[in-house]
Image (cartoon, rainbow, N blue to C red):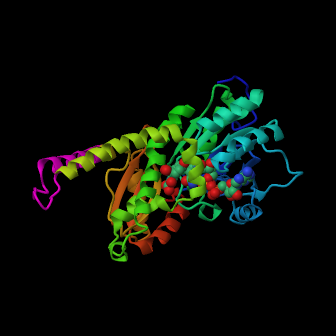
Amino acid sequence: MGDKENQEVGTSGQENTLPIGTKSPITVTVGTKGPVLIIGAGLIGGSLGMALARQGVEVYLRDASPTAVSLAASLGAGKVWESGLPAPRLVVVATPPDVTANVVEASLQEFPAAMVFDVSSVKTPIVSAVLASAAEAAARYCSVHPMAGKEVNGVGAASADLFTGRPWVIVAHEKTSSAAVLAARTLGTDVGAFLIALDPQEHDRAVALVSHVPQLVSSLMGGLLIEAPVTALELAGGGLRDVTRVAASDPRLWNAILSGNAPAVKTILEELQRNLSDLIAGLDSGQTTSETPTDPWSTSAVGAVNTVMTRGNEGVGRIPGKHGDAASQYGQVAVLVPDEPGFLGRLFQEIGQANINIEDFRLEHSLGQARGLAIIYVIPASVEPLTAHLQGAGWSVASL
Ligand SMILES: NC(=O)c1ccc[n+]([C@@H]2O[C@H](COP(=O)([O-])OP(=O)(O)OC[C@H]3O[C@@H](n4cnc5c(N)ncnc54)[C@H](O)[C@@H]3O)[C@@H](O)[C@H]2O)c1
Ligand SMILES: O=C(O)C(=O)C[C@]1(C(=O)O)C=C[C@@H](O)C=C1
């Protein structure tokens, strides 16, 4: 990490009210200092703009699409950027990954006093390209990755609460200044996320496993449905919906993410392929043929399935905060709660005061964090009134 400091950005804060799991809103310091220019006013850029603007930070928006930028401004994500406005202290590039390095490089040149961040889902190719071209200016560049999103893109799906309680990965490179890292940390904290630091290669290996290959598995499963008989599709229940939710994601965005992380994605796909081959071989050995009817519950078939099932149970049990889910007929409201005595009691009391019944409850802990997400299950008709009641009482409600 370089030692070029810019104490102007992300260090001295502005006072504002940010309710975090307290009954009465508390006054906290918003560390991110505007103006912030967000380039790419879609799902992530729009959500970031909304999260900052609602805390009083000056946010400007720029996008290759005039419609996208106007829509984002009309939804409260910031003001449309135009020449003559004060230069931004911070530029956040939230464009698709394949154009991100170019936009970062152009921003470092256009705004010589600004920090520049990107939020791309893949890091190695972008950080390498910026380092190769930006020289000195690279000290002002830090990459971040909010591990929060949706299968729907565009600012229409954006939400100010998108990052609340979610991981915010700081991906610094060898030239990133400590001031840029501090500003990247401050931004993540200001939008309610929790911080994790990784280098670009570690980041790309990790997201290949927890985000990129899961996307492909979901899409591959979705693809199997193209030729499926309608009678089969009519039977679809929660299992299929859970596995295929992200198959609805935008191909243009994911083409860029997955090709950009090809080496790490390929390594995990090869492991998946070996596991699939073992399973198929095990099932095959139990097949009944017309000449030699065999037992479908043969030791080898059951053994192969059991290996997949028990390894799946073991692996999924390691996901922090995901040890089972309540019945999907309930709606969910997620509330950020500090990990301190009395807060859950106060939350439950508040829900009682709204005269809303809690059908089920789950607490998601984030590793090493002093707060968690309380997931409250209620009947679907109670989701909106409960959200409004809790927000009115100063609780921080996250979108799910
Ligand atoms: N979607 C997710 O779940 C998610 C989560 C975390 C990070 N990300 C990353 O965030 C970035 C944005 O993703 P998104 O889901 O918000 O996409 P999006 O399609 O909703 O928004 C991208 C926006 O960038 C604009 N754009 C494209 N090229 C541009 C250019 N050259 N200059 C200016 N604007 C340009 C588009 O018009 C669009 O409005 C991507 O790098 C993605 O990898 C996405
Ligand atoms: O929840 C979703 O719909 C997402 O796809 C979000 C998700 C993820 O895989 O977790 C997708 C890509 C991003 O880079 C970060 C987050």
Relative to 99, does residue 66 appear above or below in the rendering?
Answer: below
Q: Residue at x 37, y 52 (%)?
A: 363
Quick check: can you spot residue 132? yes
The question of residue 308 being in magenta is answered with: yes
The question of residue 211 being in magenta is answered with: no
Q: Quadrant of residue 231?
A: bottom left
Residue 136 as seen in the image, left or right of residue 149: right
User: Count of labels shown?
Assistant: 0
Relative to 167, does residue 127 appear above or below in the rendering?
Answer: above
**x and y, in percent, of residue 395 in the image:** 51, 57
**x and y, in percent, of residue 186 in the image:** 63, 40
Relative to 8, does residue 87 appear above or below in the rendering?
Answer: below
Q: Which image quarter holds the N terminus? A: top right
Instruction: Name the one closer to the observer, 393 or 127.
Output: 127
Q: Quadrant of residue 103?
A: top right
Give the magenta range: 286-314
Q: Quadrant of residue 261?
A: top right
Instruction: Name the one closer to the observer, 87 or 342.
Output: 87
Residue 237 as seen in the image, left or right of residue 161: left
**x and y, in percent, of residue 257 in the image:** 57, 47
Residue 89 as seen in the image, left or right of residue 291: right
Q: Residue at x 11, y 59 (%)?
A: 291
Residue found at the very far right of the displayed protein = 84
Quick check: can you spot residue 395? no
Instruction: Name the one closer to the observer, 168 or 348.
Output: 168
**x and y, in percent, of residue 126 in the image:** 65, 38
Instruction: Name the one closer to the observer, 307 or 72.
Output: 307
Residue found at the very far top of the displayed protein = 3
